[in-house]
Each structure stands twice: as structure tokens, then as C-alpha cells.
Image (cartoon, rainbow, N blue to C red):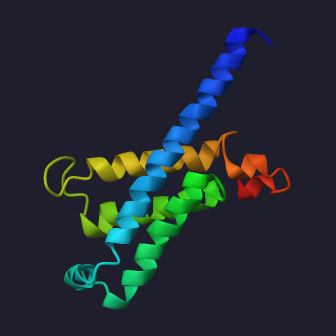
């Protein structure tokens, strides 16, 4: 293996760690903000029962944490893809790509979650450090 191949692999691992960390932090912040009591009023306005507040908040918070540390990344990214599809088609009704009700940010989060779901967490992750975990749990 030549030196440039080694540097390229290290760079790829750092990029995946950065992608995972940024997506994980974004979803953690969004999940925590959904624990605010005002979010249940928003759910009622879009036709969902207010009892969905905690499950929706946890569906963003827990996968965000798991993706950030690199455990169950593929499963967590799959769940976040479902959340983002719900945000695009149910909450914002895919009305516009840009603007106040635009879905551009949601599409970026969806695309990033798909990348994590397909590529996995990379070698700089807790799942890679704990070698005994099955590949499906990476």
C-alpha cells in the first residue's frame, strides 16, 4: 500500500466521522426541541395527536446519539430517513423547494441519512472499535 492510499483511507474515515457527527448533532438538537410543550400544539395543527410528541422527539434524539457515536448507525439512519420523509410529505407537504416551507434542508438531511445507511459509520466509530458487533449493527 502506498502512502497516498493510506492518507486517502484516513481522509475517508474522517469525512464519515464528520458527516455522522454533524447529522447526529442536528437530529439531537431537533429532538430536544420537540420536547418543548409547544410542539404538541403544532402536532394538533397538522392533524397528529399530541401524544405523538414524545415518540417523535425520541425518534430524532436517540438515533442522533447513536449515529454520532457510531453504533447502530444504519438502523438509526433508516429511522431518520422515515422521519425526514414524514417531514417532507406530511408536515411541509413538499410544497416548495425553497422558502419558508421549503424542503431543501430536509432533503439534505434525508440524503445524508441515506449515505450513512448505505456506507455505514466508517472506521472511526464505536462499532468499529468493538469488533464483536455484527456488521448489521454497525
Q: Which residue is drawn at 35% across and 78% down?
A: 35
Is the N terminus in the top left, top right, bottom left or bottom right quadrant? top right
Give the camera-side residue of 21 and 88: 21
Q: Position of residue 119 (x, y in %)?
A: 63, 42
Give the camera-side residue of 92 and 12: 12
- Give above or below for 129 relative to 37: above
Q: Is residue 91 left or right of residue 116?
A: left
- Residue 128 visible? The answer is yes
Q: Position of residue 97 (x, y in %)?
A: 22, 47
**Labels in figure, total:** 0
Q: Where is residue 29 in the image (x, y as percent from the top left)?
A: 37, 62
- Residue 84 visible? The answer is no
Q: Which residue lies furthest to the right in this view?
A: 132
Q: In this view, does 40 lie to the left or right of 136?
A: left
Q: Residue furthest left?
A: 100
- Give above or below for 67 relative to 35: above
Q: Where is residue 57 in the image (x, y as percent from the top left)?
A: 41, 74
Q: Which residue is drawn at 41% across and 76% down?
A: 56
- Give above or below for 76 relative to 117: below
Q: In this view, does 41 lie to the left or right of 9?
A: left
Q: Which residue is drawn at 42% across and 51% down?
A: 110
- Residue 93 figure quarter: bottom left
Q: Which residue is drawn at 39% across and 55% down?
A: 26
Amino acid at each position: 500500500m502506498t502512502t497516498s492510499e493510506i492518507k486517502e483511507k484516513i481522509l475517508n474515515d474522517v469525512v464519515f466521522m464528520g458527516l455522522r457527527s454533524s447529522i447526529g448533532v442536528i437530529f439531537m438538537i431537533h429532538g430536544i426541541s420537540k420536547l418543548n410543550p409547544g410542539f404538541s400544539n403544532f402536532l394538533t395543527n397538522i392533524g397528529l395527536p399530541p401524544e405523538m410528541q414524545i415518540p417523535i422527539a425520541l425518534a430524532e434524539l436517540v438515533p442522533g446519539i447513536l449515529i454520532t457515536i457510531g453504533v447502530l448507525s444504519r438502523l438509526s439512519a433508516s429511522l431518520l430517513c422515515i422521519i425526514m420523509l414524514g417531514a417532507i410529505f406530511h408536515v411541509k407537504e413538499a410544497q416548495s423547494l425553497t422558502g419558508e416551507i421549503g424542503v431543501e434542508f430536509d432533503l439534505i438531511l434525508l440524503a445524508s441519512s441515506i449515505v450513512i445507511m448505505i456506507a455505514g459509520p466508517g472506521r472511526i466509530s464505536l462499532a468499529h472499535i468493538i469488533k464483536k458487533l455484527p456488521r448489521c449493527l454497525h
